[in-house]
Amino acid sequence: MTELTPAPLSARAMGTPLNRVDGQAKVTGSASYAVEHRLEHPEGALHAWMVQSTVAKGRISDIDASGALAHPGVLSVLHHGNAARLADTEDRELAVLQDDAVGFRGQVVACVVAESPEAAREGAALVSVTYDEEPHRSELTLDTDCYAPDKVNPAYPTDTEEGHVEAALASAAVTVDQTYRTPYEHNNPMEPHATVAVWHDQHDGPRLLLYDSTQSVHSVASTMARVMGIERSRVHVLAPHVGGGFGSKGLPHCHEVVATLAARAHAGRPVKLAMTRQQMFALAGYRTATIQRVRLGADREGRLLATDHSVVEQTSAIKEFAEQTATITRMMYASPARRTRHRLVSLDVAVPSWMRAPGEMPGSVGLEMAMDELAYACGVDPLALRERNDTEVDPDTGKPFNNRRLVDCLHRGAERFGWSGRPAEPRGGVDGDWWVGTGLASSTYPAFVMPGNSATVRALPEGRYAVTIGAVDIGTGAWTVLTQIAADALGCPVEGIELGIGDSTLPAASVAGGSSGTSSWGSAIAAAAQAFRKEHGDEPPPGATTTASPEPSAGRENHAMHSFGAVFAEARVHRYTGEIRVPRLLGVYSVGRVVNPTTARSQLIGGLTMGLGAALLEESYRDVRFGHVVTQDLATYHVAAHADVADVEAEWLDEEDTVASPMGSRGIGEIGIVGTAAAVANATYHATGVRVRELPVTADRFV
Ligand code: MOS
């Protein structure tokens, strides 16, 4: 079947700034998001509202639903005493309303179903739950017991060691040994997590329909089938438009199960469930806090002899999540001796999950701030230090990098940003009452192509084609770029493509995550188009149909597949108040061919903006007495807003990477956030001479 390996595509539509094909529907409001879907039912939809635990650990001793049930409009209150049993309760995050155990504050303990959202919410406030409370632990410290997980996400070794790290550190002319901390962060996509569920009990068994806000209709369908114990083919998940995810919608969370249990209890009637912004801080995943000790040893010119990156981070006692924080240090720079290590502290807190560049984002904070410290310690320019430690071979796997252009990104960025001529010493720039400095960091992200994708091409009249795959556009532009890829693969204009995505009845597609969507789905579309043309020629009869999957590429397997970038920041710190401003932020990236410059630029400057927010603003504050996050709204959890974002620009090198994918492209969704917080923090050090080793860098930390 090797003939199905798609040949590189010729680019006609690819590379052009096609406007979003779903843009008009979005700006006119006709694009329906999850709970906006209106499903036919004579009595209309029901509304579900989740009741959350007010203790961090313990047992539910009693639930009194009488007050809620007496409230007008309330139809039912589901809890562990009356909800249907799930077929699979192994995933404790999804095993809701099954038993009396409470594993974290904010866990769902009941669900009120009512005729209106207002009645459901009021009913939820009237449910009286009493607990046998047990002592809990919710504080991440270095003094708490920790353990080594079997692997870190998704399947990397927990620890690695190569060479004699201690000996190399002892013999190094210059060393850095510092501890860096990154905070809890919460994904805050514009559209909260939401679902409409309809359960039908039919003569041949149950059937479940979900309109969901998800990054993967296929994974929601298979997870719900497994958890509910029904056949996969009888679960239908639709997500035509999704208002952001950042990873928080990459895997199903408990609300999909709650909505389904409610729908099952009211079979035939659609049930709508939307998380509130506050609920998202307990139920939709988050980035764990990290404590990272980084030790670097180098010769006088800054050539690394040893790197040691040791991370302590947090997981939930009910479900393990192991952020791959130190994996970036395994491949970023040449260093003869290298060690990385991950340890988890298990706490009675909500379950962490994916958030844009899990692993690489927090890991780049520790590594790239330590590299900055090494540069000053050696008296070497931070850019020259990165260049001096560049490597053509991945130190971790020994494989050659497919297309490592880190140094090109650094040089192009330096030229455009105006890096040269900066004061070598910190606190060398003053403008009125502001200290002014610049900083940089390297960036990288793996170039994944996920297995298990396929696509279907069907000929339509008048030379047009229907192209379908169960992919999801979470706001990134997938509707648009997949249309461009399909047009080039079939040799027709973009107007000739009728794309279908966002539906679990369409061919298998991997998650819109890991910056892998365009590469994975595009490879499937390219393979299907090539197989279609081989089978039906260039003038196929309407109705001619072919489904195909891409073959694994030997070129990919023989190389270390990564994208690279360089981020430059200017920071101004007010000498009296400590106020921080970032007037300029620039990222230069090597990401293969850019399929659509408009949507790509949005992705990259979006990542840079999120990195700016991580540098200066984002922090979820946990009250360890009660175990919950108190900053649970956008008034107290600050993200970068327009006034914080001045001049943020992204640029990419002109290139094409046919080893990475038949489109010549790699992923772009996450690399923009990697390194960015370190670049900003490094700029604040250059401005002030004070090294803040904890994010976010706030005025009070310049002490
Ligand atoms: Mo992204 S955190 O891989 O959805």
Image (spheres, rainbow, N blue to C red):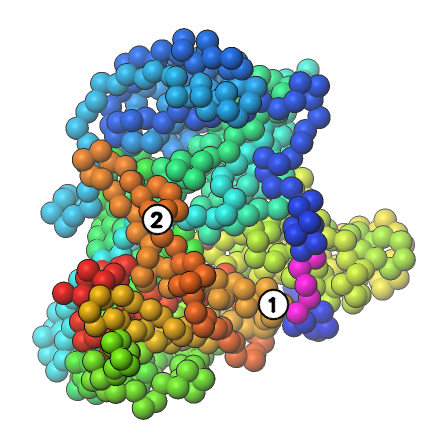
Which image quadrant: the C terminus? Answer: bottom left
Which residue, given by chain and number where applicable, does mark 2 sit on? 637
Mark seen at residue 217? none
Count residues near mark 2 (Cα–Cα under 10 Å), then give few for <14, some for 14-19, many for 20+.
some
Q: CA distance from mark 2 to mark 1?
A: 29 Å
In the displayed structure, does residue 435 sit left or right of residue 354? left
Residue 18 within the segment the image draws in magenta: yes
Identify the residue shown where x is 18% and y is 35%: 625
Tag 1 secondary structure: helix
Amino acid beneath label 2: Tyr
Identify the residue shown where x is 51% and y is 71%: 591
Q: Is residue 246 visible?
A: yes
Please state the horizontal and vertical placement of residue 540, each as a whole percent of the image.
87, 58
| Quadrant of the rendered image containing residue 495 | bottom right
Tag 2 secondary structure: loop
Q: Nearer the viewer, residue 498 or 157?
A: 498
Residue stretch rendered in magenta on the structure: 17-21
In the displayed structure, does residue 597 sit left or right of residue 443? right
Amino acid beneath label 1: Thr
Q: Nearer the viewer, residue 683 or 604?
A: 683
Please state the horizontal and vertical placement of residue 318, each as a whole percent of the image.
31, 34
Which residue, given by chain and number where applicable, does mark 1 sit on? 598
